[in-house]
Amino acid sequence: MSKYENILFDVESPFGNSTWTANNIPAFPSNYAVPANTSEFVKIEVLPLRSNSDYNRFGIEGKIFIQIYVQANKGVKRLMEIADLLDNILQNKTLTNGTQTRSSSLQVLGIDRDNPELFRGDYIVDFLFYN
């Protein structure tokens, strides 16, 4: 696999493991359509942003965005609970193919523009991958 495929595999794989699936929160890649009746889910987006060279190694730095969607008009608690679950699988980890993640942050964005029944937040983690 290439470096970009390795990074994508590393980020998407944990969402198929029992650690995540036990939470019953569907996870979709960012360009997939979500079924209309789904009221709680996450969308996974990997953004390779820049190259990084270090001691004869070539790397890629970027950000992982996990868009969290929960039911609107119920407060932010569930959004934060899901962010804590995401920390368990993505924060400060070395993933299968060597992608290294850093500390996370959460941006509370509010009511979704496309569907006012949903409330959105973005969970963000920086990553570094060396070939």
Image (spheres, grey):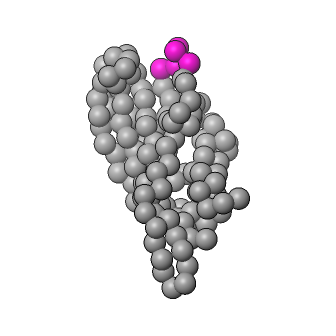
Quarter of the image for residue 74 reads: top left
- What residue lies at 42% left-to-right and 26% top-to-bottom? 70
List the single residue furthest toward the bottom. Answer: 55
- Using the image as rendered, state which of residue 11 and residue 21 is in the foreground: 11
- What residue lies at 61% left-to-right and 42% top-to-bottom? 15
Side of 7 where 78 appears, left or right: left
> Where in the figure is residue 93, as x and y percent of width and height?
53, 62
Side of 16 where 87 appears, left or right: left
Side of 60 where 18 appears, left or right: right
> Where in the figure is residue 120, as x and y percent of width and height?
36, 31
Side of 120 where 32 appears, left or right: right
- Using the image as rendered, state which of residue 75 and residue 131 is in the foreground: 131
Q: Is residue 25 visible?
A: no
> Where in the figure is residue 42, as x and y percent of width and height?
49, 34
Is 38 within the magenta? yes
> Where in the figure is residue 91, as x and y percent of width and height?
47, 57
Quarter of the image for residue 21 reads: top right
Is 62 within the magenta? no
| Start-end of magenta stretch | 35-39
* Quarter placement of the C terminus: bottom right
128 above or below 118? below
92 above or below 118? below
Chief secondary structure of the magenta portion: loop
- What residue lies at 54% left-to-right and 66% top-to-bottom? 129
Tell how many labels. Answer: 0
- What residue lies at 32% left-to-right and 32% top-to-bottom? 76
List the single residue furthest toward the right. Answer: 1
